[in-house]
Image: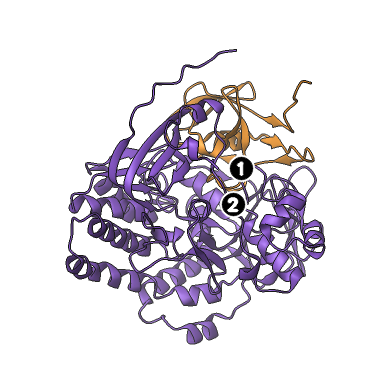
Amino acid sequence: MNLVPVKAPQAPRKFDLAIVGAGPSGMAAAIAAREFGLSVLVVDENAAPGGQVFRAAELAGADPALARDMAPGLELIARFRALDVTYRPGATLWMLDPDTGTLSLSCLNETMEFVAERILLATGAQERPVPIPGWTLPGVMSAGAAQIALKTAGMVPSGRVVLAGQGPLMWLLANQLIRAGVMPVLVETRTQPILRTALEQGGIFSGFAQLTKGIGLILKARQSGMRVISGARHLRAEGAARVQSLRFEGGFEPCDTLLLHEGVIPSTHISMAIGLEHFWDARQLCWRPRLDVFGASTHARIAVAGDGAVIGGWEAAVASGQLAALDAAFRLGRMAQAARDFQAEASADALLQARTLRPFLDALYAPSHEILAPPEESTIICRCEEVTAGSLRWAAAIGATGPNQAKAYLRCGMGPCQGRLCGPTVAAVIAETRNVPVEEVGHFRPRAPYKPITVQELAGAQHGADRLS
Amino acid sequence: MFRTRPDHRTETVQVIVEGRALMVPEGSSAAAAILLAGLASIRETAVSGSPRLPWCMMGICFDCLTEIDGVANRQACMVPVAVGMRIARQHGARDVPR
């Protein structure tokens, strides 16, 4: 056995502001915080700044399939790269102690610890789970996964590609694949009518630029000859060793790769683990942290910005990152309250403008009940522990009142993903079975370590690990 | 099944996937290398032994857990490739000697 010597404890480096995530909100917050003279730490799990929307933009910026979508990100990344901040890419936050402000991170199998007066979670969004029968078959991926493969490695699915689901990302990805030389078939699950939803929700005049871009993507894909099947219901992925076809009510599409998408939700794993108060957003059908206009949470040290706070897209994320940085400067005594409020106006206006089309998009692409709570008993909900909808309904019927109880009955949410992926579905199925609103059944309570770490990494933690609970 | 677009990603890195040398674009993750290698699965699940390939590619789903440079249970989508990296499939639950 090789015993690896553990380094002698030394006091962790201290910062005014630690930012978790180097996507649009994290980068914008870092840029603003430096203007106010704060010392800034930025940690990010990926190898380069950009978040998911501008993932690997510096590598992908010249790719004709992606260039136009990456351009605004490259500008932001260049400004971020030029900053005098401590930037740690490739670092996974596995524990955050909000009371002491200690961040425990793993980077290249080593533990790093830092302390910060104020901490901004800019952890972004994740795709909503799409638990249809057969979604665990090899060859079935989320649409975002294929987009990440394209951004990071320039690679595309070969053979027959079917995109199934709904949301702005579907049309964007369809266009990017077409530009990259792949012609997919789009099977759309949207049930809401466009015109009536627009009239009911409004925002289409003030959100005209965004709307025009969206319509442009739809028209462009259709003009390229992409086949679109609308109003598809009861999707199921079929195949033996891997996916061979997508079946839906009244139709059938053979495929080698099936890409599913039903929109995005805030990534709340860390904000929930540290015990921030969350509430159920009935419009976006997701949990999100309770925050004030500056992104300050129910914990005195912690703020949340970007899509991890509320889904709004990258422009809203930039504005909310700026607001959080202003508030950090105020709370750390570097700025008077009046100055903060005065300077906040421009960002607050930008935030409002960026969010103007959201009610329309949220209503138009609202996932159907069969996506939120899969009706078929044998459909897998928890991919890690292979827990089905049927067994979850059984657990709820015999007394599992919420996700944390179901965990003890079935192990759902106890696998390596810690309920990141199945959490929304587990809650929805229990709520449906108990016939109560989903906010009443609650959500998983994740715990540190947020990601699996080695014993060596745990031993390397000098300041945070004794509070691991 | 995935393919590269070498005209647009010229820089490549050699990795070893299941004992076979493979050139993959710079910036790829280990999970991307497995997809490019055309393997039928990246792992078999610990519960039922069913085959899986990556689902999310962004560190959420943990379906790409695999063995990288001899260390099991790595999130392959979060590990950027490096020259000579050895990526191997993971089979079911760990066998613990009694």
Under circle 2, the secondary element is loop
Can you give x and y, in whole percent of width and height, for residue A283 in the image? 53, 74
In the rendered structure, the answer to whether residue A253 lies left or right of residue A260 reads right
Q: Which quarter of the image is occupied by the N terminus of chain A?
A: top right
Q: Which of A73/B20 is in front?
A: A73
Res A447 seen here: yes
Q: Is residue A403 above or below residue A205?
A: above
The kind of residue on which mark 2 rests is Arg
Can you give x and y, in whole percent of width and height, for residue B65 in the image? 62, 36
Q: Same chain for the residues at labels 1 and 2, yes or no?
A: no
Q: Residue farthest to the top?
A: A1
* Total count of labels: 2
User: Mark 1 Cα within 10 Å, few/some/many (few <14, many 20+)?
Assistant: many
Q: Mark 2 points at which residue?
A: A420
Q: Alpha carbon of mark 1 to alpha carbon of mark 2: how far?
A: 9 Å
Asked if the residue under mark 2 is in contact with the one under mark 1, i.e. CB atoms within 8 Å, the reply is: yes
Which residue is depicted at the point 30% across and 55% down? A28
The kind of residue on which mark 1 rests is Phe
Query: Residue A81: which disc?
Result: none
| Label 1 vs label 2, nearer the camera | 2
Q: Name the residue under label 1.
A: B62
